[in-house]
Image (spheres, rainbow, N blue to C red):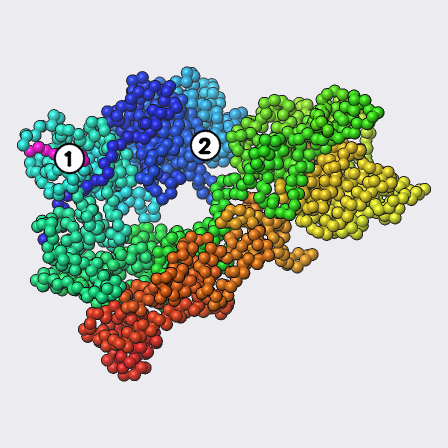
Amino acid sequence: MSNVYEERATMIAAGELQEFVPFGRDHCKNHPNAVNLQLRQLQPASELWSSDGAAGLVGSLREVTLHEKQRESWQLRKGTGGGIEEVEFEEELYVAGNMVIWTRGSKNQASYVYKAFTVDSPVLQAVWCNFSVPQNKEMETEIIETVCIVQNTCVNIHSVNGKDFISPLPFQVASVWPSKFGLLFERSNPGTDVTQSPPREPLPTVFSMLHPLDEIAPVCKSAGLFEALRVQYVSDSTLKIVFISCEPSIVMTYDTVQNVHTIWALREVKPEEQAVVLKYPDQIGTPQNMAVNSSLTAHLRNVSKDSPAASPFQNYSSLHSQGRTTSSPGLHSRSHSPAISNMAALSRSHSPAIGVPSFSGVQRFNMSYTPSPKRYSTSHSPNSTFNDSLLANEAEPIAPRLCIDHLWTETVSNHRERNCQATKAFITSDLCEQKFLCFLVESQHQLRCVKFLESNDLSQLIFLSVTTISARDAAPIEGIDAMLVLEVNGSLVLYTGVARVGKVFIPGLPAPSLNRSTPMPRPSTPLDSISTPARPVVMLSPVPELRGSTKFNESSLIEDCTVQPFGTYVHAMRDPVHNRVTLEMNNGSLLRISIPEIANSELVRKCLLAIKYILPKEIAVKVLIKWYNIHNAPGGPSCHSEWNVFVTCLMTLMGYSTDRLGWTRNLDLEGSLSPVIAPKKARPSEMGSDDDWEYLLGSEYNRQVDSHLLASALNLDSVEPLPPNEELSSQLSLDHSAPLFCHIPAVFYVLHLVYEELKLDNLMRDGTRSLVILLLQMARDLQFEEYIDFYWRDYPSIFKTSKQSCIIDQAQIGHMNQPSFFTVEPPCVFQWLSCCLKGGGVLPFPYLPGICERTKLVVLSFALYILGDDNAVSSDVSKYLVKISAGQKKQVNEQDSKRMSMIKPCVLNSSIAEKLVIWLTNTGFTLKDLESVPFGAALPIRDAIYQCRKQPSSDWSEAVCLLIGRQDLTKQAHEVTLAKGKATIGQMITSDMPPANEAEEEDDGMNDMNQEVMSLIWSKDLRVQEVRRLLQSALSVRVNVVHLPEFNDHEYIEEKENKLLQLCQRTMSLPVGRGMFTLFSYHPVPTEPLPVPKLNLTGRAPPRNTTVDLNSGNIDVPPNMASWSSFHNGVAAGLKIAPASQIDSAWIAYNKPKNAELANEYAGFLMALGLNGHLTKLATLNIHDYLTKGHEMTSIGLLLGVSAAKLGTMDMSITRLLSIHIPALLPPTSTELDVPHNVQVAAVVGIGLVYQGTSHRHNAEVLLAEIGRPPGPEMEYCTDRESYSLAAGLALGMVCLGHGSNLIGMSDLNVPEQLYQYMVGGHRRSQAGINREKHKSPSYQIKEGDTINVDVTCPGATLALAMIYLKTNNRSIADWLRAPDTMFLLDFIKPEFLLLRTLARCLIMWEEILPNAQWINSNVPQIIRENSVSLQSQEVSASEDLNMETLAQAHIYIIAGACMAVGFRFAGTANSDAFNCLYKFARNFMQCLPASTAVIMGHYNLETCLSIVLLSLSMVMAGSGNLKVLQLCRFMHKKTGGELNYGFHMAHHMALGLLFLGGGRYTLSTSNSAIAALLCALYPHFPSHSTDNRYHLQALRHLYVLAAEPRLLVPVDVDTSTPCYALLEVTYKGSQWYEETTVELMAPTLLPELDLLKQIKVKGPRYWELTIDLNKGTQHLQSILSRDGILYVKLRAGKVSYKEDPTGWQSLLAQTVNHRSPEVRGFKPEAIKTFTSDAALVSFAECFCKPAKNLAHKQDVLSLFTSILYECVTQENPEILPTYMAIDQAVRRLERKEMSETFELWQIKLVLEFSSSKILQERLKQTPGEGLLMNSEFLPVMKCSSDNTLDQWLYAYGDVLKSYLTGQPYEEAHMNMLACFLVYHSIPTRGKIVGVCMEGATSFSDLLKFTRLGVPVRALLRLAPILL
């Protein structure tokens, strides 16, 4: 018998033979570049085959001149990631000429070109390489996937995400290798280095590049673990790299002198090793080196003596700079860019091709000897000092980044040939995960396999034995852990590790056969190396007939005789991917074959895994090889199931004789098995015979029909098969010499665990049925009674058929290994879950790691959720699960548990449901998996999910939200993950494109606003269109002048042009407001320039619509009138770009206009890019480029933009940039640069922005002095001094923003006192600080004397004080700023300055600002209040001693200042008190304008104050689009002429812009930084004409952007992706003014400032609730708001959105159903569509709930289904519908007594136990009505009908139960119901009951003993009548 298990000559059939052509080859011919490359017909690769190592590895390359033939190569790999999910695909990298083509393709997608690259010179080599880039300090790395293309002089690196790098190569490269860390280069031709004289140290030969921007650094090697730290460069020119692997990271080299292969570990270098190499780079080892040292090295040593800290970095940066003259850029600068000079030196050193004299950059690798023995002495010889100085400028050794450690060298044998370098190497693993490194020595036809394993701590690799296999070629087959070997005789053999599996037979390819009739030709070359006698034996392997092909006899070759067969044969193999490999034939054709998988069916695969896991490795490999051969024999098991073959194979291996066992014999009959197992049965005839009928009767199918409802419906009698021949079953016994015989118990137990695992997967139900037959047979034979009973209870129907058992000799049982983990009690997962639900104690459940994953998931979920053990999934896993381990103790287990503990949910004090859901997500569990878990086991998990769905947390990850079924949250989380990945375009709601007719008109710059959201916010009127009309500047204005009779035509034309000039003042001021309105509303297309709307300064005169133009020469027009307005126009256009857009440096430069007239617009565009943060992307080179042009506007825009982009960062490079433009920041001796005044102003403000809030002492000191900078002698600093002083004051305020009195380290500057003096005047102090020299001689133009000119310095100083003491409530400083209260003092101060003082004082006393008129008037001093003209009064009361004009002007300015303070205090809050108060003042000012009192106050002053109040009003209502304010703005827009100049128009339109800031999406912040920005932007002195920058630089008006923040929350319906209304509940934190309050807002709405809020909640009842808790931090909400404020919401079932149904009446329909009313029955299924759009539910209603004629008797079923459906839909848990249905069906089946398996009964039992479990009872106590997911009335009904059915059966057939319990025989007919009864009532097995002594039971109290066995009391009550 034993020969059955021996290896026979077997064959394995390979599949899918296809011709292979590299996809890139065709593409190359059609590639655009192909024309000029003159591609010839490419040669087939095999002719180019060459045997030198590198070429053989890369692909078949041959050095051919480009004229003759194009050389080509390619490589394939398994696809990684890419866009194709879940599908394994292949990638090909094809190289020909100058082209590299990367293609992808998979089984279900044809190959396509992914990327194609064309380079300048022929490609030497192309490889894929992954670089890992460290992201942050926590050592997280980002992997960059790249393709590296090596040319002669450089390497091009292209990353997948589109970045390109070019690195010059400093030497000729022999080959390039991708490694785990980056690229490795092997320098070619090191032989020439040796001949140089004088003799030098050898150059390094291996170099690494860890990032495309890094320098190429040499690789060093450590000299062993146990020696001292000796590290040196790899410079041995005899070492050739043969192979590099990424995982594990190892390098294999070949020594060309000693002819041995060596394996090294590749790792990153340690800092101390780096230091060693850098200090002593001489090669330790050669004696001459010890004696004479290189000058360089000695020099290094001197340096390291000089420098005290010899850290590697120190050496690195300061090597060779002896006089410290050329200190090389240190490491910090290299982090930004590679040291370019080094690169240049390197690249010139070794490439004569460039034609540069070969200047010795080589010296950086330390090889210059000087024959000076006195190197160590102090007296340098002149020679050496010269040498030093020369080197000092040139060389700097490069720090190595990678190091190799020696691991293994092959043993040297005596007769080793010269050239035995491996041509191919790979890593393969065998079926039991043992790893081998195999390398092919082609010259000797040997494949050497080195076994290696990881040490226990995973830190190093241990290499073990070497096995040699005779082979011509080999390739790894990763997909099935095997390798394919091409034997010397030309046959293909499959090996796993070093164990031979069998020959591979390729259909369609004639095997290399020996024709025995003709004498063998002798091989032409005598093969002396292989000296083994040939065995002249020809073994024949029986090959079954091939279907569809002619029969032919195949003889196995004589193994050791090499023969070149005639015809085609396999010549080599290449490109293995997964389980496919390409065969190269000798005629040059390429064929791709696939090697079959180890198993196709999931069931077989699981069983194999379990068997492999439990058996010792050697036996496991044997079993798997045996199975693989049987499974994949030619003509193999296509005609019948894989499972049958598996069973037969397994049982044979265990010693059964399968053809004599009844049920396995049937398996054989189903189709002939492969010849290995059973000889093929001859078919007597096609007509059929009696055996066939017998077979049918005995089949599984017949048994199932027997118990099927069809059989009972048709009243069929059961046909019993004839009893099997008795003689067969009489002497069945097991063969104890079978390989698996002694392991039968272990195999049985693991298969049982697989069975339990499969029970938890609905999709594997058939698998359990198949498996249980096998288990039952084994249990019978092993006489495990408990197991037999257990299987019988699961599948009672199976027992009717198979009763054969085989006898196992008692003596032999002793030989079996009884595994320690074996339990007599069969582990049952449902039993375990049931115990859990009942609250009993549970033992740990056994499981197989990696195989029984679902068991583990379900068990731990129950432990966590039902038992409430928080640590079940983290630290206490072992309480609930016990790992089965045997033969293979893998380290995986520990890692598994480590991973489990890492996953520990980081949820504090969260509910258990939440923990469970998060844990399930982390383990990768999805809804799809949940659907296949049986309904009873899944219910608690569904319950947890439902709990989480009702009260989700807003910050859960996307996967968690997906699991709990909240699409709204899922989409939200998806956006967040996208945003983390990269700046995405956040506009999910795309605004509709304007209709065509609108597009044809002039673009007014406001087309890109999001109409959808604005129409929701302002749904009742057309205010947005009105704003667009007011702010557009692209159309000509209408010039309406009445032609009076006294005007002649010329005068009339002049009159029209004068009118147009007035209107143009307004047009030119519009862009600032338009910039506010369109703020951040547009995502530009990177391929198109930004559209900038025209600034149209022409007019149209009615009635004939004639054009009026200012350039006609009739009237005087100021020069450069439109220069600033076009700057503002550029800013407005640039500010449309949203910060999330993806733009880059190239796009910014691409927008540069061609004609010079648009230069101002471009300057504004640059400033805007700074304000929205994009200017940081502009390359430094471009910035300098723009600045050197000397265009004033461009400099202003660029300096302000760059500073705003670097707000508060103290960035050094920007500081340098700004300092050049500020004379005060340059050293006194520096050349005076002629910087335009406005550029200086911009630069000063820039310093303030870059240093905002840092209180940087030096800058503060300079700025303080600059406020009072006196005019200089040569006209410098004489014009527009006010704006410079103001800018210095603002900048000083920003630098010290809000620091108040705690300005650290500035007490000696006396900042407040100095500012006070600037404010009120006095003697100028002596100029302190650096600029003393400059101001010695006074100005020749301006005589100021030694007093401070207050008119210049006061505004800057006042605002500086306000900003330094902002919100500090410092009363003493505030009192300095009080308005004077005597007439005498009032005469000394400009009324305008009173405004600034009042504003400054209020900003300091921030907490005291109140939004009412009383408080505003309280700022006016008493003298003014008593005597001034009130705003209301009409007549003027004259007074003798008081100057009424002064008082009146002071009055209105102070009030305006107080109003402005209210505006700042309540900016962006839309506070109604503040609004009403300010609105009243605005109306008052407007009434004053026409009144007679206006003469006293001055029209100009009134207009100024009115503009300021209007701006304050807009600040409070920013972004809200308030109608009253809009009416005021429109009124002011209409007024032109008179006192209304350019500045006032600008103020009015800024107010309009603020009101609709960002189209209603933005509002203002009141943070310190925002207030500072608003002070710059809204400075209350407006320019008098369009080029006026005297008092305030116009460009600063745009700094309001820094105060704008997105606070609009837009609910978006997740199903329709459209914005909608939703009710929000916003909770404020308590504060000193109010308690914690909650308000309801209808979103979309602007939220209050986030730090005032506690939480935001989307309220029901129409939408699913969603809470955003701001106590955890505001980042989540901020990220939502910054991405257009999109908050996804989901409508609940049966609800209608607020837009369609504002009142809420349409949902009445839903209410009738919600209240469980009796109308449910009368409810029409058609109405389902109002509740849900789920297609599955709608079709369910169609199919199952509609009454039909033929279903009249099924009315109750219909109504049940209808009510179930409504229950699910209205309670919104449609996922419970299948559970309801399954329970109902199961109970009905039980009633009809049709249960052939008890599986569903277990589920019902689990559901009932869950409904009465402790967790639900407690929940009901806390929240009544919040019970189980399922309807409370449904389960009791089901329970009742199940009980009834079983009780009726018990009443009728109680004796069957009794005979079962007492062990008597009983009728088989009642088996099914008996099993149902036993399972349902948890009655223990017979053995246990006998143990509790049933005989003596006389009373019920005796029966109560059974409760110890877990029998419930209600079951005992039913047993009592039978047993007592």
SS at mark 1 in the image: loop
Residue at 36% over, 44% down: 86
Q: Amino acid at mark 1?
A: Ala
Query: Is residue 654 at all visible to an observer of this figure?
Result: no
Horizontal arrangement in the rendering, residue 520 relative to residue 1698 (left or right): left
Please give the name of the residue rendered at 25% of the width and 78% of the height, measured from the top-left corner: 1894
Q: Which callout, 2 or 1, points at the residue further toward the start of the chain?
A: 2
Q: Which residues are magenta?
A: 508-516
Q: In this figure, which residue is indicated by the disc labeled 1? A: 511
Badge 2 local density, few (<14 within 10 Å), some, or many (20+)? few
Q: Nearer the viewer, residue 397 or 571?
A: 571
Point out which mark residue 464 bears.
Answer: none
Which quadrant of the figure has residue 855? bottom left
Q: Main secondary structure of the magenta part?
A: loop
- Is residue 1115 or residue 1054 the one in the foreground? 1054
The residue that mark 2 highlights is 163
Residue 496 x, y percent position in the rendering: 22, 43
- Classify 456 as above or below 1859: above
Q: Is residue 509 magenta?
A: yes
Note whether residue 1776 is visible: yes
With 1376 as the anchor, is 82 left or right in this view?
A: left
The location of residue 1339, given as percent across then percent down, is: 78, 25
In this rendering, is residue 856 above or below 1226?
below
Q: Amino acid at mark 2?
A: Lys
Distance (Cα) linking label 2 and label 1: 50 Å
Residue at image point 8% right, 62% down: 727
Mark 2 vs mark 1, foreground winner is 1
